[in-house]
Structure formats: structure tokens, C-alpha cells
Image (spheres, rainbow, N blue to C red):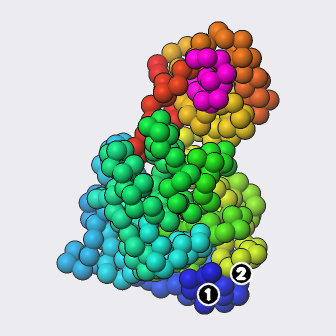
Amino acid sequence: MIWNSAAESMPRVAREQLQLDRLQETLRWVREHVAFHRERLGGARVGALPDLAGLPFVRKTDLREQYPFGLLAVPRREVARIHASSGTKGKPTVAAYTAGDLDVWREVMARALTAAGARRGDLLHVAFGYGLFTGGLGFHDGAERVGMTVVPVSSGNTARHHLLLQDFKPDVFAGTPSFALHLAETLAEQGGKPRELGLRIGLFGAEPWTDGIRVALERAFGISAFDIYGLSEIIGPGVAGECEARDGLHIADDHFLPEIIDPVSGAVLAPGREGELVLTTLTKRAMPLVRYRTGDITTLSLEPCRCGRTSARMARVKGRSDDMLIVKGVNLYPSEVERTLLAVDELAPHYQLVVDRAATLARLEVQVEPAPEVIARCGGFAADHPEIESLRRRAAEQLRQATGLSVELTIVAPRTIPRSEGKAVRVIERG
């Protein structure tokens, strides 16, 4: 099912003309209303979509420097809502919305929910945080647009989630994949049966996750798991989402124009090349952004999908450009480690990378927990048990073959890796 076939399935030629028209209007709008954009864009003109490559980038540092309202393109009284990042690395980045912007957000979220198989009348359990974080309200408003019944549980309070999931038996779950795995694990430990909750679909985002995590989620809950992508600077969740074909995430590119660039040189890369995702808002009015560097590493495809949608598709995010680790001269994304670990059935989907930079050459330790069935066969956990030691050597060798690094792999006792009620912390840096 397609939510808005006119927008999601329009011919490529018509789509590109619409994008150009909206891009030119956006450039006119920001020049007239935002000094920051007027100064950086100068007199540059865009007569065709490829001309966009000649315009400068916007970075997250620019948003922080313009904090709080330096990028507003409308009078403050016309702003209907304000969201913001957590600000853990400095001042928060502010996202402002007019009433029209909120309507666009509901529209693109309705598309993403419908693409994943959600339907009018479905009961949606929202485990994303509400408040300044865009996750909870983004899913909430989009689901109401579809006609779903929303249970706004928010994040945290594991016991409350257990109660409501078992008593309400929702059709659809939305949250971070790490928190969903935590819910399944703790419910099973208490004698509950996650596969008997009645869930049909899981919608996950807000942190990179691999197909190994997808398999773990689907096994735990008996669901189909879908990736939804977004960022508050652009609109929130709903920038892109997987359809039921699960062959990439469909970008709502009539509202958000995507590019892939080389993270180092900034040069635009052809479809299929891996690089950093850059997005330009085409319809946002309160706080438009032109060529915003997301930091997310992915690829683009412009080929039509077998589901009937013709929008650009992005591969699932591999990681963030600033999350890339350099260990002994080797570039490594945490997702590459995750993908390898979770291909080993005897390992649980709970791991952490510890990077020690105190030495001349950085040292990487990968800590991972064994699967429950391994513990059962061993009669409990002992790091020196022959089966666990054999598993450790095998997993370490698979990591070496996949990454080119000889890493120190440690199999730790169950529940050693911290569980998350929000975004998982996968990398710990020391030294």
C-alpha cells in the first residue's frame, strides 16, 4: 500500500522538475529571510539540479553558532513548535517548525509508516522519547494522520512497557532497536513470551543497526522489522523509511533533496558510491537548510523499487563519519564489528567496543556476551570453559578476516554489557 501515490510514484522526470522548482524557491526564501544563508550563498544561481554541487555546505557547527534562533526564516511568533538535540557535545541544535512544516512532517511519517505495512486502526506502542527529542512526537503525529491508535508510552520505565505490551497487545512497536532488545530480554527473564505479544511490525531508528540486529529483533518478537531514518535538523523521523520490499529506505525526496559526497573532499559522488549523506530541505519554511552535511555514511539509488515507488533510496546507514575509528591505521565503523559478531549464532546481540588510546598504537577490545543457549550448555558462565574459549577464538578470527584487524575479543558474562532505555552506547574511549 502507498500512502500518497501521486508523490511517491511520480515519474523521475516530473520528480526532478518538482525538485528544481522547489529548490529554486527555497534558495529565494532563505536569501530573503536569513542573513546567514544570504551571506554564504552570495549570488550563486541554480538553473539545474547538478548546479547544487556548487553551493557551500551547512554543518552542525553552523547551527550551534546560530543558536538559538539565528537560522529562523519566519518571525518567532509564526513558529508552532521547537525541538532540539540533547546538546551533549555543546549547545543543542534547534529545530523550528511552522504549522505547515508540522503538516509536512505528518505527511512524510504517514508515508513511512504505511510503507512498512502499518494500517488505519492498528495499535501503535511508541517507545521513543517525547519532549525535545523528535522521535516520540514524530511517530505519534504521523500515526494519527494514518488513523492508527497511539499509545504514547515514551522511553524508560521497562516495567511499564512490559505491562502495556502484554495487556494492550499492540500491532506495531516503535523505538530504538537496543531498547527493544532490552525489553524482549527482560520480559523473557521474568517468564514472559515476547513472541506472544501479538506484534506484527517493528519500526526502529535513532541509532545505526545492522541486519544482524534485524534478525535478533525478528526472532525475539516474531515481527517484521523496518528501518526509519531522520534527523531533527531536517525534520525528525520520516526523512526516509523502508517499504515491505526492504531494499533500501525511500527518501521523501519531494521534500528532502539528497546527495552523496566524499566526506574528505566534499565532491559529489555518483549513485551507488558510498559516502556522506547531504540533505537540502525543499519545502521547510521555519528553518530551511541548504546542503546540510548529516555525517551519516550510506549510498543512494535512483532506480525504481519493485514496490512501485520511484523516490531515491538510501542504503541503511553504515555509521557516522565522526564515529569512524582509526585503529592501527585501519578505518573501522562499529557497524562492521556488529555485522560480523551477529553472524555468529552463539553470540548475543549485546556488545561494546573499548578503544584504549593510552598506548602509542590504539588498542581495540571487543566485549560481547554469549547467547543464552551457550550458557545453558556450559552449565553457567566461565570464561575459561572450553566451549566459550573456542567460541572466543572463532569470533576473533572472523573479526580479523572481516576487518583486517587482530582485535582483543573478550566474551563477558551475561548482563555485563550495559542495557539502554534510549540510544545504545557502543563505543567507549579511554586514554
Which element is circle 1 on? helix
Write down the quadrant of residue 386 in the picture.
top right
Residue at the spot 47% in from the left edge and 39% down from the top edge: 191
- Looking at the image, residue 379 sits to the left or right of residue 428; the answer is right
**If the image is split into quadrants, where does the N terminus sit?**
bottom right
Q: Which mark is residue 308?
A: 2
Residue at the spot 61% in from the left edge and 54% down from the top edge: 222
Residue where numbered disc 1 is placed: 5
How crowded pointer 1 is (Cα within 10 Å; few <14, some 14-19, many 20+) is rated as few
**Looking at the image, is 64 positioned above or below residue 192?**
below
- Along the line of sight, which residue is nearer the eye, 7 or 55? 7
**Looking at the image, is 336 positioned above or below residue 353?**
below
Q: Could one spot residue 39 in this view of the protein? A: no
- Along the line of sight, which residue is nearer the eye, 362 or 230? 230
Residue at the spot 64% in from the left edge and 38% down from the top edge: 338
Which element is circle 2 on? loop
- Along the line of sight, which residue is nearer the eye, 380 or 174? 380
Q: Which residues are magenta?
A: 366-380
On the image, the x and y values in percent for residue 345 come to 71, 35
Is 142 colored magenta in this rendering? no
How crowded pointer 2 is (Cα within 10 Å; few <14, some 14-19, many 20+) is rated as few
Name the kind of residue labelled 2 in the image: Gly
